[in-house]
Image (cartoon, helix red, strand yellow):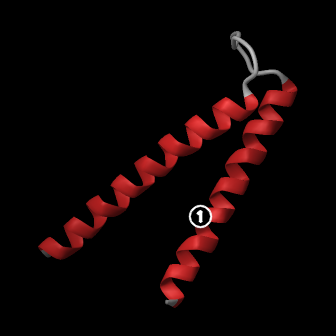
């Protein structure tokens, strides 16, 4: 493997970690309204799932637009 490939992999890993952190913060603040117990409520589970899907869909759209530039 060459150095460029390894650097690219590390860059992608860092971007993924950043996305997960942002996603966690945004969706947690939006969906978890009280003190969490041992399990999320059904509404919290649904909200977290929908929030994550929307965030990922938007990220894909943004990446595609940057690729087209």
Residue at x-position 80% and y-position 37%: 47
Residue in the picture at 66% in, 64% down? 58
Locate residue 24: give its quadrant: top right
Residue 5 visible in the current orientation? yes
Q: Residue at x 53, y 73 (%)?
A: 63
> Residue at 36% across / 56% down in the picture?
13
Side of 11 relative to 46 (left or right): left
- Disc 1: which residue: 59
Q: Position of residue 65 (x, y in %)?
A: 57, 81
Label 1 crowd bin: few (<14), some (14–19), many (20+), radius 10 Å = few
- On the image, the x and y values in percent for residue 53 come to 71, 53
- Residue occupying the far left of the picture: 3
x and y percent of residue 51 in the render? 73, 46
Q: Is residue 1 visible?
A: no
Residue 42: x %, y % from top left: 86, 27
Reply above or below: 40 against 51. Answer: above
């Amino acid at each position: 493997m060459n150095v460029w490939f390894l650097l690219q992999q590390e860059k992608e890993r860092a971007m993924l970690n950043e996305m997960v952190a942002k996603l966690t913060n945004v969706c947690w603040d939006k969906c978890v309204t009280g003190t969490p117990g041992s399990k999320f409520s059904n509404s919290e589970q649904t909200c977290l799932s929908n929030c994550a899907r929307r965030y990922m869909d938007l990220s894909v759209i943004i990446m595609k637009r940057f690729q087209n530039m």
